[in-house]
Amino acid sequence: MSRLTTTLTDALGLDVPIVQAPVGSATCPALAATVADAGALGMLAVTWRDEAATREVITETNHRTDGVFGVNIVADSDAKDVPTETHVEVCLDEGIDIFSFSFGDAAPYIEQIHSHDGTILQTVGSAAEAKAAVDAGVDVLVAQGWEAGGHVQSTVATLPLVPRIVDAVPDTPVIAAGGIADGRGIAAVLTLGAAGAWLGTRFLATEEAHVHRRYRQRVLGADETETVYSALFDEGWPDVPHRVLENTTVADWKAAGQPETERPGGGEVVAETDDGTPIRRYEDSLAVPGIDGDVEELPLYAGQSAGLTQTVQSADELVNTLTEETVEALERAN
Ligand SMILES: Cc1cc2nc3c(=O)[nH]c(=O)nc-3n(C[C@H](O)[C@H](O)[C@H](O)COP(=O)(O)O)c2cc1C
């Protein structure tokens, strides 16, 4: 039996309690399948994919791996065009049996997913939210702390959040997210009572992640002090705080006194997608390959864990490195 067996590995059939977090459009079949092949949980974020694209990424991932992977759906309807119920239908139809919901309630979909023998994960940001989710029938919780990259659900840091949630729902596996980028972090959250670790920023620095080269370079070069938590990049998904690397867009807005309206360069086109769609300065667009223009001005989503993210590895090498580091860290602690 692996020394890293937990209630999460048992529940989902994983070799190691490591999750490649859903990192929006940076997820892709190559990333999720490579992670799944390495014995960890691969995730496809489908929120910003339409029905056809959702089917396509699931089919391709299935072709690439026999390992375990799931989908993430942001349940906040302000974030996207495709209704959550449509995404759920499409994913069930494609045979998905691991669903993660964030930024909203999984409750409306629990009965339907359970009737297909599916497992439901929900991201929460407090002990009260955790209790409510478990009472509604959620199977696994993701406790996402404030230091996380991308959009952030909690105002509490991972270190106090995880044990609060573990204590609130002792019979439910809890996966810790936010600020974890190496085996020391994984060992730490396992010690706090988590059954697994959910790493986002660290997986941006893999060969398979679907991210623009210049974005990845900024993540690799960033210190832990270089991220900013704000609701600045609100065009596309308003009023939800997120953590990004400080760039010129953020610095100019700070220098202008952090105005809520009439922000510097508001409405200005800074880049365009590969099909020529313009991207304006305060849009929520993730910097994927093929974007042309001032990529560095876009929201460079990253957590404080960027400070620990210094090398690019293939995703399977990363899972192996993280596993070895975790075992070593736990042995040291013993
Ligand atoms: C580029 C990026 C995109 C993200 N997209 C999503 C998403 O689509 N859905 C979601 O629930 N969380 C999303 N997140 C949050 C991650 O799932 C995860 O909670 C976070 O990255 C954990 O913190 P870490 O970056 O310190 O590892 C995103 C994070 C990043 C960095």
Image (tube, rainbow, N blue to C red):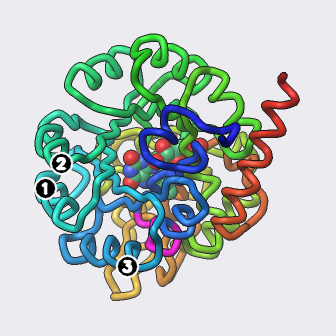
What residue range appears in magenta?
25-31
Quarter of the image for the C terminus: give it: top right
Q: Are marks 2 and 1 in contact (CB under 8 Å)?
A: yes
- Whether 208 is drawn above or below 263: the answer is below
Q: Nearer the viewer, residue 106 or 6?
A: 6
Residue 123 is drawn in which quadrant?
A: top left
For residue 39, which quarter of the picture?
A: bottom right
Who is closer to the viewer here, 259 or 279?
Answer: 279
- Residue in view at x 13 percent, y 59 percent: 89
Which residue is identified by label 3? Answer: 60
Q: Is residue 334 magenta?
A: no
The structure residue drawn at horizontal position 32% and vertical position 81%, both measured from the top left corner, is 277
Q: Position of residue 260 (x, y in %)?
A: 36, 40
Q: Residue at 52% x, 38% y: name it.
A: 229
Give the prevailing secondary structure in the magenta stretch: helix
**Residue 301: image location, x then y, percent:** 53, 54
- The mark found on residue 77 in the picture is 2
For the residues labelled 1 and 3, the Cα–Cα distance comes to: 23 Å
| Residue named by callout 1 | 83
